Image (spheres, rainbow, N blue to C red):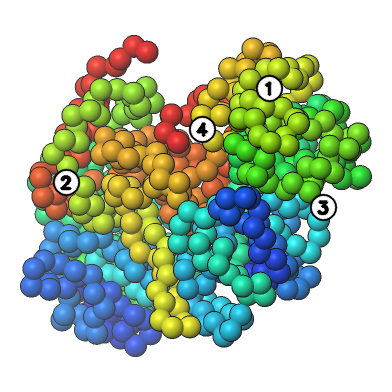
């Protein structure tokens, strides 16, 4: 972290890729300008950063790359507001600001020696991709048991990271299940909502952690399925979103009860969330 | 120890050369903390300022950084500027408020340099209260109207002179520039009397935090907030409220990133980009305000984030009184869930 946590480092937007068919999500690849910046930016899967589009403002986004991918950071961002629109329209080669890494991360130390089931829906797959990528790395793969990824979107065109998914299909180190909401031409894999597909796949909860990220409705209906599969709340993790400004636990807007999502989160276990007020 | 007001005034005028000196001044509509050049400009007889002195560490509007774009390139520059400052005439409630803000701007992970560098370069000269307003209720929080907690140097007005208490090392450095004399027995008796005073208005907060632990879903919040207009004046006039917004001011290729006071009572405060808003109604926002001050802050920082200065009571356009709100929570029936 920099000395003044409000000052962004400068990074170069080297690729501005339209990620989904509806053109609402782009993946930005940012390049560190020097070794020092990169060394100071030591992060783990699940952390986020504040991206500055100079002239427009700054907003928080989950980091989609894994620390095992040196030199760059990737963010997959939906076009919803002032900053995200500016980023979508930004020409490659433009300098952007980055503050971070911020927040906590998925408890990968606890995951060691265990199986991990990653369940993601829609464009909430970004930090889950970071997590999967991290565990799949040659240096880390041996630390974990089975890795299962259940990932769904409304239709095939809305899945993120399609090339990588194709690669994972044939990778014996990972068990990938993809699904779409309704049948589509040329789609040969699962059809159905995440909760019912999870129920169908029925991953064993023995020695297994689950990480669930997605739209609120998906999470709401997936949790009872995991409960039925005997996942205790202490072994189910999720990552929350909140409106943020400082990212440092000071500006006061992202709290859920006593916890600031920016500094104490964004990763929480279901056991932790049960203790917090339902205000997120 | 004591010093005559005449001698203190001379020393004060000499300090102006080395420090930016902030003191209470009558601005026509009330008392404001303002930079002064002479002790003769300082208002001696006042209850408290309209706005809390927190603005000297956490301004209502401040530049965090500036940038300049040239083509695809950008240069970024910090806008942190710090001056040696003396804050004179700070009331015990506000001095305590600063100690509470210190905990916010330096948390378990981050230190806010804009706040902290100013804070570290500032000396607080507290001034005990010899008059108490009907809206004052600092004694509820173990703050004494003539207590020195949070001040570096603390004065009590004895008429022609000030009783002087050196509280910190910073305060000692200032006291070394003052010609101090011993108090007489009569003066000591007067000091003791002033120091033992309490605010007549007090609320019982002994069980409030534990009560609020169980009140998130209480129907108490349903009606509590009905008359609130959501104007935010309570937050802006509060010595412990610290919420802020960060935005950008742009002119052609140059811009500054600024932070501005914000408040949890504002509907847009928590609005997500997606349109979802976790606190989209006044009930949730009032609950947040009260919970933050009397419950969440206690769990995170070990004390309540209210100092009983009474500004929110004085300035509320619809007469909401935080004392009654807390009292109501104390008395509210718990709903069995």
Extreme residue toward the bottom, this view: B17
Q: Do circles 3 and 2 both sit on a common chain?
A: no
The residue pinned by badge 3 equals A68
Q: Nearer the viewer, mark 2 or mark 4?
A: 4
Residue at x 34%, y 69% (from the top left corner): B61
Whether residue A78 is visible, yes or no, is yes
Residue under circle 1?
Answer: A198
**A76 shown above or below A231:** below
- What is the secondary structure assignment of the residue under circle 4? helix
- Position of residue B236 measured from the top left corner of the image (x, y, whole percent): 26, 56
Q: Is A16 placed above or below B309 here?
A: below
- Name the mark nearer the viewer: 1 or 3: 1
- Which of the numbered marks, if any, corresponds to residue A216? 4
Few, some or many C-alpha atoms within 10 Å of disc 2 (few <14, some 14-19, many ≥20)?
Answer: few
Numbered disc in front, either 3 or 4: 4
> Counting residues from the N terminus, which is met first, the one under dot 3 or under dot 4?
3
Q: Tell if the residue under mark 2 belongs to the same chain as the one under mark 4.
A: no
Along the line of sight, the residue nearer the viewer: A130 or B14: A130
Label 3, label 2: how many angstroms apart (C-alpha)? 52 Å
Chain that bears disc 3 = A
Q: How many marks?
A: 4
Question: Is the residue at mark 1 from the same chain as the one at mark 4?
Answer: yes
Query: To which chain does the residue with label 2 belong?
Result: B
Residue of label 2: B229
- The Cα atoms of the two marked residues, 2 and 1, are separated by 47 Å
Query: Residue at 35% across / 64% down in the picture?
Result: B260
Nearer the observer, A250 or A107: A107
Whether residue B118 is visible, yes or no, is: no
Camera-nearest label, 2 or 1: 1
């Amino acid at each position: 972290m920099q000395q003044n946590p409000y000052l962004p480092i400068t990074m170069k937007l080297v690729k501005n890729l339209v990620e989904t068919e509806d053109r609402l999500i782009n993946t930005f690849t940012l390049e560190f300008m020097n070794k020092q910046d990169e060394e100071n930016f030591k992060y783990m899967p699940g952390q986020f950063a504040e991206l500055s589009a100079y002239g427009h403002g700054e907003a928080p986004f989950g980091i989609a790359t894994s620390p095992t991918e040196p030199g760059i950071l990737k963010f997959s961002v939906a076009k919803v507001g002032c900053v995200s629109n500016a980023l979508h329209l930004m020409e490659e080669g433009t300098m952007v600001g980055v503050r971070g890494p911020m927040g906590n991360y998925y408890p990968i130390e606890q995951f060691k020696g265990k199986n991990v089931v990653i369940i993601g829906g829609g464009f909430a797959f970004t930090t889950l991709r970071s997590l999967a990528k991290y565990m799949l790395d040659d240096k880390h793969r041996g630390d974990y048991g089975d890795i299962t990824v259940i990932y769904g979107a409304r239709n095939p065109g809305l899945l993120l990271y399609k090339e990588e998914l194709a690669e994972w299909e044939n990778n014996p180190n990972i068990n990938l299940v993809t699904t779409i909401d309704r049948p589509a031409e040329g789609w040969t894999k699962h059809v159905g909502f995440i909760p019912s597909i999870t129920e169908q796949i029925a991953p064993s909860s023995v020695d297994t952690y689950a990480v669930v990220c997605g739209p609120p409705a998906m999470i709401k209906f997936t949790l009872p399925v995991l409960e039925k599969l005997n996942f205790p709340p202490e072994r189910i993790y999720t990552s929350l979103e909140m409106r943020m400004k400082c990212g440092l636990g000071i500006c006061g807007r992202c709290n859920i009860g006593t916890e600031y999502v920016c500094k104490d989160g964004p990763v929480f276990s279901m056991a932790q969330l049960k203790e917090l007020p339902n205000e997120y | 120890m004591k010093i005559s007001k005449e001698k203190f005034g001379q020393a004060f005028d000499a300090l102006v050369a080395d420090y930016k000196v902030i003191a209470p001044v009558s601005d026509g509509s009330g008392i404001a903390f303002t930079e002064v050049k002479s002790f003769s400009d300082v208002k001696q007889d006042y209850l408290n300022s309209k706005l809390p002195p927190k603005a000297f560490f956490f301004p209502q509007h401040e530049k965090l950084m500036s940038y300049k774009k040239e083509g695809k390139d950008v240069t970024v520059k910090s806008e942190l500027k710090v001056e040696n400052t003396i804050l004179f005439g700070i009331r015990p409630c506000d001095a305590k408020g600063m100690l509470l803000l210190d905990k916010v701007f330096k948390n378990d992970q981050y230190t806010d340099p804009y706040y902290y560098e100013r804070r570290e370069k500032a000396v607080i000269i507290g001034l005990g209260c010899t008059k108490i307003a009907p809206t004052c209720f600092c004694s509820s929080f173990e703050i004494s109207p003539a207590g020195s907690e949070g001040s570096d140097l603390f004065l009590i007005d004895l008429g022609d002179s000030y009783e002087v208490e050196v509280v910190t090392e910073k305060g000692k450095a200032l006291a070394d520039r003052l010609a101090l004399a011993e108090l007489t027995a009569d003066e000591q008796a007067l000091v003791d009397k002033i120091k033992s005073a309490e605010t007549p208005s007090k609320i019982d907060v002994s069980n409030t935090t534990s009560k609020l632990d169980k009140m998130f879903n209480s129907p108490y919040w349903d009606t509590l907030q009905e008359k609130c207009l959501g104007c935010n004046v309570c937050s802006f006039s509060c010595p412990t409220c610290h919420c802020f917004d960060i935005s950008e001011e742009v002119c052609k290729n140059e811009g500054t990133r600024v932070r501005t006071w914000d408040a949890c009572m504002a509907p847009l405060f928590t609005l997500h980009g997606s349109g979802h808003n976790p606190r989209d109604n006044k009930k949730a926002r009032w609950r947040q305000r009260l919970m933050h001050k009397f419950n969440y802050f206690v769990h995170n920082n070990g004390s309540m984030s209210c100092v009983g200065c009474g500004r929110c009571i004085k300035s509320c356009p619809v007469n909401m009184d935080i004392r009654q709100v807390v009292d109501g929570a104390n008395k509210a029936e718990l709903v069995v869930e």
